[in-house]
Structure formats: C-alpha cells, structure tokens
Amino acid sequence: MVASLFRLLLSAVLLALLVAPSPARADPADIDAAARGVVRVVIIDRRGGQVTPLSHGSGFAIGTERVVTNAHVVRQAVADPSLAIGIVPSDGGDAIYARLVTISDRNDLALLATTAPMALPPLTVSGNPAVDAGSVVAVGYPMNVDRAQGLSAGDLFRAVPPVKSAGFLSGRRPSRDFDTLLHTAPIARGNSGGPLLDECGRVVGVNSFGTESGSADAEFFFAVSTRELLPFLTANGVVPRVNSSPCRSLADLEAAEAGRAEREAQDAARAAEADAASTARRQADARRAIEFEIIAERENGMAATFLLLIAGFAAALYGMFLHEFPRENETATRPRIAFAVAALALLGAGGAWAARPGFAQVEGRLADSLLAQRTAEAGGSDAGDNPAGSYTCVLDESRSRVVGDAAGDVAIRWAADGCVNGRTQYARTGGDWTRILVPEEEAAATVNRFDPATGEYRVDRYLLGREAREAARAARGGYQVPQCGGGGAAAIQLAQRQQAILAVLPPAPNERLVYRCTKNDAGR
C-alpha cells in the first residue's frame, strides 16, 4: 500500500515537472545590449543649494537624446517647478538633467529630453510583439534591491547596471483607459518606466504597476503595450527603431545554416555524381564516335590503296605492252611515262596504306576533343574571372537575424582590388573580403564580408558595452586605414591589423544580415 502511494506521488511530481513552464530562453547578449540603454530617472530637490534625490524610477532610450518613462515617475516634478529630473546612464558616464517633452496621464507615458549629449544606445521596439504567451525580461531599478544593498541617496547618481528579471506573458489585459500586457517578470517600486523585453531584447511594453497580493496569491505585473507606446512617440515627432522580424537566437540561425550547408554539400555531391556520370557518357559517346571515325579512315585508306595498286599495275602492263609492241616511228617516251605512272601509283598505294590511322590514336583524339570542349565552355562565361562591377544585394530573411531597424537593399560597386563604392577598402581574409567598422558615434562594431564569386554579402553587428567599445576603438585607432587603390600591400596590411579588432569583439554578434547579390547588366 505504501509503495503504491509512493509511486502515485512520484508520478504526480514528474507530471507537474513536465507541464510546468520552462524558464525564459532570452539571449543574454541581446538583453545586455538593450539594458545599456536603460537609465535611472531621479526626481531631484535642488532647494537650498543642495541636490537631494526624492524618488526614482526607470526609463529607456528611444533615441540618442530621448528617454521614455512612466508619467507617474515624473508627475511630482511636473507638479512642483522647484524639482528637477535627472538621468543616470547604466553603462557609465555622468548623470545629467533632463527636461520634460510631454506627459500623457491617460496611458501613463512620458517623454524626456536630455539637456546634454549622452549618446545613449536606443532600444528597438517590437513591431509585432507576442501578447498571449512567450518569455519576457523586465529591466529597471527596483528600490528594494537598492535598500538590500544599503545604497545611500548619493549612490542613486552613480552608474550601476539595471536589474533584469525573467518571466512570461500572461495575455493582453486592456484597462479602462489604455492597453496593457499582463506578465510575471517580477518588478517593484523603481521599475516603473523601464522596458519589458522579448527574447531578442526588443521592447514589447513599458512596465507600469503590479497587482496587490497576499502571501498566498500569485503575483502579476502590467506593462503599457506598444499599441500605446508607438502612437505616443509618433505624436511627439519621435521615429523609433521598429523591428517586426521573428525572434530567433543566433544559435538557431547557425544550426539552420549548418543544415543548409549540409544540404548544399549533399546536393553538390549528387550534382557532381550526375555530372561525372554525364561526363562519362559523353566520353563514351565521343570515344565511339572517334573509333567509328578511325574505322572509316582506315577503310578509306584501304580503298585508296587498292585503287592505286590497280592503277599502278595497269600502268605497268600498259608500259610493258608499249615496250614489247612499239608502233612505227614511235619513241620510247610513252612506255617510260607509263612506267613512271605505275611507280607513282604504287608509291601512293604504299603511302595510303601507311597513312591509315591506328586505334592507338583514340586516346589522343579524345583528350584533344575534351580540351576543346572545356575551352569553349570556359570562354562562354567570364563572371568568375571578372567579378568587378555593380551589384544589387537583397536581404535573405531566412538566413538573417535582424534585431534593429528593418534592413533594405544594398548597392555595391565592387572593384577587383577590394574597393567598395569607390571609397571603402576591403581586405582579403580567408576566402572573403572583409572590412571592420568601429564608428565613433555608435556603440557598435560591424564586420562586413563580401564574396563576389558567390554573390554573398554578410554583415555581423556587435552591440558593445563601454569597456568593449573602448577596446575596439583603441584597436581601430592603432592603424591608418588605406585609401582605395593603395595596392595589394595596403590590403594585406589592413587584413593583419583588423585581426586586433576581431580579438576584442564578443564571441558572437547580436545581429547578422545575409544578402544575395546579383550583378547588374553591363556592370553599371
């Protein structure tokens, strides 16, 4: 009896584990990249010459100098002109003041503008977010974490990483006044105004409030949905980065790419086998044709030999007849001519017999025929020998991972020495031409690769934190990029020096764009 109850209890536990929701599978690199655009929003009392923080919430960059937060986070500063709003970046840098651009109490949204350049990395808004299910991550600055760490009021102005908490969407839950998402990613006071992210680090909502629950009640939390956020931004002249691509991890993409490469290899192997079989058939047909040709030539030689022998013997007999029975007053010239003709005919017969081709010539003639065929085929297409020209590159969405703005077509004017569009020099690295870009105005590095032989253009984009960004810029500042047309030595040197940048980049990019490039007519 006890054993039966134990087995029943064990089965129930295993069943519960099977049906329990799995933990969020958010990509840490994407969440970390988005978190660098999250800020602490502090309400500051400046009366009496003192700078005193009164309260704080969270916010996130929607542009390099624009920050979204909740209306209730900054409401106190709106009501009291003596109070100010401060912005504390999460990825280092000094805190600065912000001014209120607009506030919407109806849907609890506010837009702030920084009073000094901060170059905050803007977050991307999901254009087609899930609303009923899926993993999400809340990012912000909960006050209970600050208290648990014993942070002082002055510590609120110091840059510290935001807190990330994972959970699941529990459905769309419109309130009486605005559209919200219900989720289980834990938030507390201070999280208000921070982003709710999907697994690709894209904003699906703005965290606003939570349920009041006793110790036995489940906790749920609310975020202002993008149905409210996007019209709010548009109405205030902000054009956010919006992406509607499906969210999939780079690991999934690389697994699919490996499967595609394996299928292509199998297709290539099958094509090679079919080509080998076809080549063998063509060679067999060519061999038979050459053998028949040689047989015909041998038969023609034998026929010519026989005819020449008959002609020679006839001429010799005629000469002997003239010699034995000369006519009156006839000289010996005519018999001599007949004998000469006979001799020439017999020599021609010997030459015709000797000139007959042997079957040993089959292999040589076959090799000459195949060489001529390959030469003709190679002369019909020079695309591989001359890749220079103008290309139009179209994004292959099935092989790409887009987490930022939607990507458009790319035009490439390619030169054989690796110059792109007449201004950007690429370097030959492995089988691809590569150029690494580390812009000063962006918290990212981009590795561009182009293979003119296959028409593939790939862009790997790395979203960098402050330390990685400074290391990449230091490596980039260690050399001078050659101008286009600098010659092969300059491209080789560029390839060697770009390795220093690759060494400090993260193991995997956040974004990968793969383009299929088609050469335009006349290479214009």
Image (tube, grey):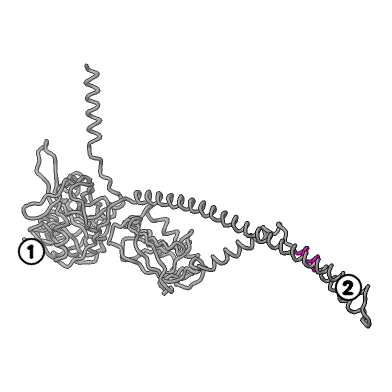
Residue sticking out furthest to the top:
1
Say what amino acid the circle numbered 2 marks: Gly
Nearest the viewer among 107 and 44 is 107
Number of disc labels: 2
Position of the N terminus, as image quadrant, is top left
**Residue 113 appears in which quarter of the rendering?**
bottom left
**Residue 110 appears in which quarter of the rendering?**
bottom left
Residue sticking out furthest to the bottom:
329
Can you see residue 85? yes
Nearest the viewer among 184 and 371 is 371
Residue carrying label 1? 81
Prevailing secondary structure of the magenta residues: helix
Can you see residue 343? no
Badge 2 element: helix
User: Is residue 76 highlighted in magenta?
Assistant: no
Q: Is residue 188 above or below residue 439?
A: above
Q: Which residues are magenta?
A: 348-355
Nearest the viewer among 271 and 403 is 271
Residue 76: horizontal and vertical position, in percent? Answer: 8, 58
> Neighbour class for label 1 at 10 Å: few (<14), some, many (≥20)?
few
**Residue 47 appears in which quarter of the rendering?**
bottom left
Q: Is residue 163 above or below residue 83?
A: above
Q: CA distance from mark 2 to mark 1?
A: 140 Å
Badge 1 element: loop
Residue 496: horizontal and vertical position, in percent? Answer: 48, 61
Residue 322: horizontal and vertical position, in percent? Answer: 90, 74
Residue carrying label 2? 319
Earlier residue among tags 2 and 1: 1
Position of the C terminus, as image quadrant, is bottom left
Say what amino acid the circle numbered 1 marks: Pro
Residue 391: horizontal and vertical position, in percent? Answer: 40, 69
